[in-house]
């Protein structure tokens, strides 16, 4: 067999429990039924104590949270500015396109008027020879 298999076999072999094992288990179960051993204030406080951090670590977490909030606010403001600038740019684009259409219509009208007037009069060379 491989050495790993032998180590697993020896680690997982069946062992007999100590003679007072059952008594200790029953004693622990009985201690858990005691009214003060439930989820009272003392037990809740001891449970929460496992999450307590040293003062420096708490300050670091508070600073990290404040920084994350600050970055979220700054990001939101910058995105709002970006959207506003984009909307204003779209409106300006539409106004320029409308102005170009109006200018094109006016120029086409002027061109058609020039062509109409030009058709009525004889060419400039013909008038000069007369």
Image (cartoon, grey):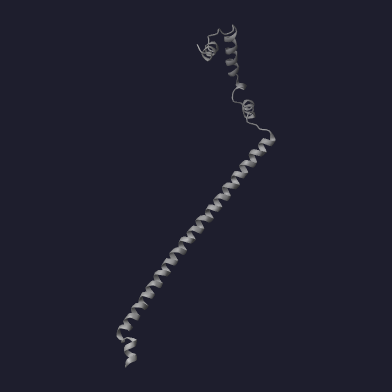
* Front residue of 44 and 11: 11
> In x, y percent, where is residue 51?
63, 31
Q: Residue at x 60, y 17 (%)?
A: 31
- Looking at the rendered structure, the number of numbered marks drawn on it comes to 0
Q: Residue at x 68, y 33 (%)?
A: 54
42 vs 82, nearest the viewer: 82
Q: Is residue 64 above or below residue 46?
A: below
Residue 85 vertical placement versus 65 (above, below): below
Q: Residue furthest top?
A: 19
Q: Residue at x 60, y 11 (%)?
A: 24
From the viewer's perspective, is 41 left or right of 109? right
Q: Quadrant of residue 121?
A: bottom left
Residue 39 picture location, percent across and down: 59, 25
Q: Is residue 33 visible?
A: no
Q: Quadrant of the C terminus?
A: bottom left
On screen, residue 111 versus residue 95, left or right, reads left
x, y percent for residue 27: 60, 13
Give the farthest residue toward the bottom.
130
Residue drawn 59% across the image and 45% down it = 69
Instruction: Say if residue 111 shows up in the picture.
Output: yes
Quarter of the figure with residue 107 = bottom left
Q: What percent of the width, then of the height, locates residue 93? A: 45, 63
Q: Nearer the viewer, residue 118 or 33?
A: 118
Answer left or right for 21 relative to 55.
left
Residue at the right extreme, as displayed: 55
Above-or-below relation of 50 to 23: below
The relative height of residue 45 versus residue 115 in the rendered view (above or below) is above
Q: Quadrant of residue 109?
A: bottom left
Q: Nearer the viewer, residue 64 or 104?
A: 104
């Amino acid at each position: 067999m491989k050495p790993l298999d032998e180590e697993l076999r020896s680690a997982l072999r069946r062992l007999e429990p100590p003679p007072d094992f059952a008594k200790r288990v029953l004693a622990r179960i009985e201690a858990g039924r005691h009214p003060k051993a439930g989820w009272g204030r003392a037990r809740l406080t001891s449970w929460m104590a496992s999450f307590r951090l040293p003062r420096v670590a708490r300050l670091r977490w508070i600073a990290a949270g404040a920084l994350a909030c600050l970055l979220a606010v700054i990001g939101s403001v910058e995105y709002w500015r970006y959207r506003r600038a984009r909307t204003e740019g779209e409106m300006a684009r539409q106004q320029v396109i409308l102005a170009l259409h109006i200018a094109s219509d006016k120029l086409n009208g002027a061109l058609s008027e020039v062509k109409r007037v030009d058709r009525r009069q004889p060419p400039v060379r013909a008038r000069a020879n007369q």
